[in-house]
Image (cartoon, coloured by chain):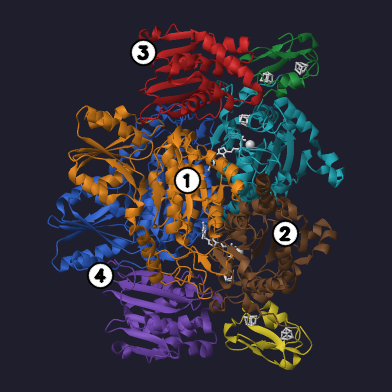
Chain colours: A blue, B orange, C brown, D cyan, E purple, F red, G yellow, H green
Amino acid sequence: MSKKEAVLLQGDLAVVEGGMAAGAEFFAGYPITPASEIAEGFARELPKVGGKFIQMEDELAGMACAIGGSLSGKKSITATSGPGFSLKQENLGLGIMIEAPVVVVDVQRVGPSTGLPTSPSQGDVMQAKWGTHGDHPIIALSPSSVKEAFDLTVKAFNFAEKYRQPVILLLDEIVGHMREKVILPDADEIEVWDRKRPPADADKENFNPYEWTDDLVPPMPDYGTGFRYHTTGLFHDKTGFPRGTTEDAKKLMDRMTAKIENNLDEIILYDEDIREDDNIVVLSYGSTARSAVSAVNEARENGLNAGWIKLKTIWPFAEEKVSKLAEKANKIIVPELNQGQLIREVERAAKGQAEVVGINRYDGTLIKPEHVLAEIEGVK
Amino acid sequence: MSKKEAVLLQGDLAVVEGGMAAGAEFFAGYPITPASEIAEGFARELPKVGGKFIQMEDELAGMACAIGGSLSGKKSITATSGPGFSLKQENLGLGIMIEAPVVVVDVQRVGPSTGLPTSPSQGDVMQAKWGTHGDHPIIALSPSSVKEAFDLTVKAFNFAEKYRQPVILLLDEIVGHMREKVILPDADEIEVWDRKRPPADADKENFNPYEWTDDLVPPMPDYGTGFRYHTTGLFHDKTGFPRGTTEDAKKLMDRMTAKIENNLDEIILYDEDIREDDNIVVLSYGSTARSAVSAVNEARENGLNAGWIKLKTIWPFAEEKVSKLAEKANKIIVPELNQGQLIREVERAAKGQAEVVGINRYDGTLIKPEHVLAEIEGVK
Amino acid sequence: MAVDIYKYLREDKLPHIWCPGCGHGTILNSLVRAIDQTDIDPDKTVVVSGIGCSGRAPGYLKFDTLHTTHGRAIAFATGIKLANPELNVIVLTGDGDGSAIGGNHLIHGCRRNIDLTVILFNNQIYGMTGGQYSPMTPTGAVATTSPYGNIDQDFDLVDLTRSAGATFVARGATYNPRQMTKLYKEGLEHKGFSFIETLDQCPVNYGRKNNIGGPTEMLDWQKEHTVPASKWEKMPEEEKEGIFPLGVIHRKDDPESEYTARYQQIIDSFAKEDE
Amino acid sequence: MAVDIYKYLREDKLPHIWCPGCGHGTILNSLVRAIDQTDIDPDKTVVVSGIGCSGRAPGYLKFDTLHTTHGRAIAFATGIKLANPELNVIVLTGDGDGSAIGGNHLIHGCRRNIDLTVILFNNQIYGMTGGQYSPMTPTGAVATTSPYGNIDQDFDLVDLTRSAGATFVARGATYNPRQMTKLYKEGLEHKGFSFIETLDQCPVNYGRKNNIGGPTEMLDWQKEHTVPASKWEKMPEEEKEGIFPLGVIHRKDDPESEYTARYQQIIDSFAKEDE
Amino acid sequence: MSRYEIRLSGAGGQGMILAGIILAEAALKVDGLNVTQTQSYGPESRGGASRAEVVLNNGIIDYPKVITPDCLLCLTQAAFDKYGSELKEDGVMIVDQRIDISEAAEEVKDNILSLPIMKTATEDVGLTLTANIVVLGVISEIIGNTIPSKNIKEAIKNRVPEKTVEMNMKAFELGQKLKQ
Amino acid sequence: MSRYEIRLSGAGGQGMILAGIILAEAALKVDGLNVTQTQSYGPESRGGASRAEVVLNNGIIDYPKVITPDCLLCLTQAAFDKYGSELKEDGVMIVDQRIDISEAAEEVKDNILSLPIMKTATEDVGLTLTANIVVLGVISEIIGNTIPSKNIKEAIKNRVPEKTVEMNMKAFELGQKLKQ
Amino acid sequence: MAKGDKVTLANSGWCKRCGICVHVCPTDVLKLGQDRVEIDDIDKCIGCENCELSCPDFVLKVVKVNE
Amino acid sequence: MAKGDKVTLANSGWCKRCGICVHVCPTDVLKLGQDRVEIDDIDKCIGCENCELSCPDFVLKVVKVNE
Ligand SMILES: Cc1ncc(C[n+]2csc(CCOP(=O)(O)OP(=O)(O)O)c2C)c(N)n1
Ligand SMILES: Cc1ncc(C[n+]2csc(CCOP(=O)(O)OP(=O)(O)O)c2C)c(N)n1
Ligand code: SF4
Ligand code: SF4
Ligand code: SF4
Ligand code: SF4
Ligand code: SF4
Ligand code: SF4
Ligand SMILES: [Mg+2]
Ligand SMILES: [Mg+2]
């Protein structure tokens, strides 16, 4: 692909294309609707470039295996949907703790439980941040189109590699299963980041795999390159070993938190179209953003002062940005395919400065532009 | 026990005592520090009264098995800590979807991942609400003492049975492992609720297991009593069968949400001591509340206008109550053994009306009264 | 004397949603006949499944039925049975459900020798999700996740369950419904963990894609690739490759070693103390 | 010619934290000697464990070492190995870690016949969490969660792994460190999935509580309850009860059926197409 | 063109989704034309209703699904009963002849094109399964040059098994004739 | 009595936690006296430091752990090095004689009671493992009637194996003597 | 199965035309019609029940002819 | 093991007094001291390495006597 020709591409397969473009070398996972196409795509594509695909016995193993691939030095990815995402949580936590770059795709369907397996949802937004036990930093991106699925997959790999951090890619079933006309960029137009490895002349004997480096991201050697280092899900000091002192625990948590918090400008991605005098803002993400944009455009045609912001990065949440929006706007409308999840963050950030209103569907149906428009127009 | 004699009881074992007092008949789980004592206690006690204990192969199975026990008509419980709680999430979601009464204990240790297995934490507070995929109602209780561990275990069973709902009991390692002098109530002083079962003369042929009853909680027959009904983790209508219409999905979600939301008065438990002119409020829960109370008492001695509220029910969050507090107070202090979890709910509810300040430890050490006092006094 | 299978079927849910020629229906058909041949009380019978096309089977059966999460049916069933040992608990599971994600619960159920009857619908593929390979997909076969041929080995599930401790182990095939019925009946009547693998066909996601053909060709394939267990034992090793023995493969009758029976002894020991 | 075991040990982490007389140390001791006898490149060797007292073993070994989550070591190891088949990947796991929560990964590792060497520290108990019963705790034994005697059956893990597809299966015991070393060496050199169960002692949470005694009595117990595999085969069934065969129980040498080798063939087929 | 919405509804196994994909792929080659293709099916992975949708627009396509179809196909009675009431004022509804349209709403009645699609596939082409391609012929005539019929034919060729290309071309052309 | 805090520190295996539990159980029987008992140990399940704490109070015990001990026991050098600097002004620190206290802070130096605890257990009682009970004897003398010694003896009897009751009584009494 | 039993289309609407019954019938009694199975020649039926037992869709039932 | 090899306490500080080495020594060379293992009678040592191989704590090492 990528001869600048328009193709009809499914969102799930855009993840595959994006992954291959970002240099994915390893996929481990377990099939589940509506994410199976991602596994199938990687099964097809990876061996062509010497990469590996493996279908594991379950999602726990899929997550574990993908982290294993990452430790061996390969750019790794796994993909699932809600039930499998729940199963991945424990090992996702290990990935966070040992700072393993890995991309975890969750193509959301309606939950809880088996729910409506073939219907779209944005019900795992909070789970993406809070699903595993204990405090932990997380990055989660959510595309609203097939092209964005491609772009954000590349970003997800880049962030994972740069920050030594599992990155969640939250599609919804609409974006995952829809086909769209897209023109993919050529390889040389795509920025690809690789993890920082120790320099060739590193002192392997005295190497500290969890050194508090300036950028807070310790260089990561591939297994098998002579560093012979230790990695554990226990709290550990810079040597990688647990020392059982609470001081080390705090230091590690603070570094892991700061490596993300210090780079919010780079990590928090969004698009917006908010004019100086727009006093109604629609904040959305994923497929829902399409209705939001459509509705705002129509509202403007009707002479209303409405604008939109579409979050591509959901976690870390664009708190500062939303706070500022709330200062200016009278009303922030948050359409979501759930009972109201990210709206909680919006409310928190808004601190009562703007009215925050949700539009919610959690039954597998979509939020249409007209629903958003009605809320913009104040009609219920 | 319970001859009104003071006993020295460990928090974990208070859960066992509370469970037995509430009529627990079935425990299924998997050992993990610092919750293993709960399993061990039930292994000892249950067979004495004809109840059953089983150690399963893992936590996923423990959760599943406990739900199975519940469906057979027994009051069921499982217990774990963070890593196991992560593993239980998928089946917990099924329990919610099929409305199975079951008590899930999480004795929190420091995460993420294996973390600090023997140190206290309140790091799973958000996970208790958001750990499983998809929207879902949840109830979570958190005791701050051994006696409360007993009392809230009884409550947890009662809520589980009354609302056909998994109830989370969030201990922290301090409460779980500390021993305290307690006097347990006699059996006749303990209010024990049983699930509503269909009446003896129910029309079994035409029985709808998920009927939209007035109280929104459909009566639940024991397996093997001739109702021959169907249960599924898919969205279903009142017959228990999936029909694949989105209308049914919404109806079910709305009923499940409302059965909790309509009963917040009963479900949301808290203690408070806030005087008319207290303008500083310390909001806390679990073992941390003990330092909070201690600090407030000292602050008052020092002439400060401070009060405290201790949440025993964490989820559903006491939103309205906190909103009102924020209207009155200048400052709400939220000490937590995590990076700041429930404080997010406090901030949301406060809507900017009061300053909300966290005190946070996430390294296995405790928040001492002096830390809280310093914050009350405004010294950092 | 015709069998009244509708006693056990939720007729209003039929026709079922399985594809034309899917063997799952034949298994269901044999199962209700087997149940009819036992004196199991339908009011005291619970059928539990996981997720998959096979997982839909309980929905058609007129008992207490439970459709759980993918792979976990045996763990739920264990709770149901232990909490009330009076119940007859039947688990219907797919090859993916029961041997991939559910493999651990399967071997631990066997190990405990808890009195469940587990029927595994082995269509050698993940039917419901559109044809990814399962642990029972033969090496070399094409599936959506093995576009270049499956490099995994498949399990010998009857050997695995036997070695894990199951006390009744058998294999049937949908081409031979009479034998299936017999095996299910024996499994249902056995006190202890019974496991009956059933070779089954998924024409849509396996047969057609592997050039075996449609339902009837797949049944012929079964016939060609199976032999009676008695004959199997006498076959030279090299001929066994790719051939499945059918029938009862292993059985050990020792009701006292059954899990709930053992638990009851503990309870009884306290009851005695009380006397 | 003395063995320089410190080449493979992180000396600064010693003495280890295991209890006096814990067999885990003896296993570690035998393992480093076995490694020394192979020509494995320490720089290309990765040791992976789960959680448990046994899970602490990698911390003492001077390789790339990974302490994962409880039960999942084989799944992590599978990723490490498949992503870079050049690596020698060793998994150290406990009986709880490897056969309870990790049972599924164990049998699927066997089934794939991926080239891992898995050593299971079978002390028949959950040591780290204070003595709950494991799937390897004998029936009748007392543990903190079986105060009235364990009613579970234990697995025959060598039979289970063989039947799941492992191509090298053996059992050692800490009372016989020479044999352990030999079995580990053979396992390490075998191309395919190697599984070596090792009977091991936890005096603190098993031996003393089951009136077997301390470390030395437990070693004597081992001696009394084991026989060489060759002898085992000839024993009458009734004498086998409670006796464990030691030595290589099963082996099948077919490097081409190894998982990463098979995967490489797919990759090579594309490389060829390119030519 | 401005936004144009096509909904194809039928039963699982009738190839609605393939037809949608083919249409969308055919649209790819039209300069400046954007396209989204979506589908929906019930929790039952097979059987039950199946629906594919294609949205065409010269501008950006925000909402990717059909809001109110300009062109609606109902291949089964169930599909008609479910979707038959939603149609743009100047839209076209194609239904198979066997479908009972007596219950159709007044406002759409005049826009219904009842054609012997299944019959054509089964009897004239000789394979019921080609009904979806017959449908494409009909639609090609309706949408005219928005997507040139040669594009659609090309897209069909790329998607159907080689051995069946000829048969499918025939189905397409018979479909065109049905409408002409 | 008002809040009184006891910290027992030593190595894993020295029975610090058991000693804490015995003290707490002994306190149970004292009318109006509240008690909490806590412990902490490292991620290593065995070996390493071990610490048990008991807080006594006639009122409600809010904070359940020791803030600054009134009575501190250090049975090993490691324990002393770690905890030996925190003590109430009028508190008592009990250390085993073998411990080097030369590095002790000035302000606590006078409050240190250096006693041959291990020696008493090993040589006089004849079992090193009884050191924790010797310690209880010492503490009993320190806290006096807050918890009557007969309560502590009772609690010891309930907790130790029957066969060892006599030996443990001896250990307790020898401990009392050490302080007297 | 008893002598004189014959196949009937008990639930002919449920037939999915899979062809299994036709395949397993030893005497070619059944055939596939346009939409569903049809009985081609009931006289040949020996009441062996192969079809009834093999049909995945509970379509066929072998009953006493007099019933 | 070679003739003339003898046991040494290579890391005597690591000894946990478990007694295993004493138990497996065929010639009663070793004994348990107050705090750790001790060599009772080195002359009896036949250098069989039983102790070295069995010790869980890497305490013992059998070496050439001349070393
Ligand atoms: C946790 C989880 N993972 C994955 C899935 C997706 N899934 C549903 S059924 C299935 C496989 C079914 O295969 P099998 O058990 O063989 O049953 P069949 O459909 O072939 O009868 C999968 C992977 C799921 N529902 N839940
Ligand atoms: C998910 C999860 N569940 C439970 C635990 C608690 N846990 C830690 S180790 C262990 C058992 C260890 O037993 P085994 O594997 O036999 O190792 P041993 O300590 O005996 O060497 C358990 C249950 C955990 N850490 N994580
Ligand atoms: S997909 Fe396969 S298993 Fe599923 S119903 Fe169809 S034929 Fe049966
Ligand atoms: S508890 Fe048992 S397994 Fe763990 S270190 Fe001690 S003796 Fe070994
Ligand atoms: S076997 Fe059943 S479904 Fe198949 S063709 Fe015959 S009657 Fe119809
Ligand atoms: S009963 Fe036998 S002979 Fe008669 S139709 Fe059925 S299969 Fe043919
Ligand atoms: S075996 Fe090792 S640790 Fe045990 S007593 Fe002997 S030298 Fe000490
Ligand atoms: S080498 Fe052999 S003889 Fe010498 S001390 Fe060790 S065990 Fe005894
Ligand atoms: Mg299958
Ligand atoms: Mg163990």
Picture layout, residue D157 above or below residue B262: above
Residue in front for this viewpoint, B27 or C210: B27
**Front label number (2 vs 4):** 2
SS state under label 4: helix
Picture layout, residue B375 above or below residue A366: above
Labels 2 and 1 within one chain: no
Residue D212 placement (x, y as % from top left): 72, 31
Residue D98 placement (x, y as % from top left): 62, 42
Residue type, numbered disc 4: Glu
Report which residue position mark 4 lands on.
A370
Label pair 2/1, CB-CB below 8 angstroms: no
**Front label number (1 vs 4):** 1
Report which residue position mark 3 lands on.
F90
Q: Residue at x 60, y 38 (%)?
A: D87
Cα separation between marks 2 and 1: 34 Å
Residue type, numbered disc 1: Val
Residue B293 placement (x, y as % from top left): 31, 34
B106 vs B293, left or right, is right
G49 vs B108, left or right, is right
Report which residue position mark 1 lands on.
B105
Q: Quadrant of residue D141?
A: top right
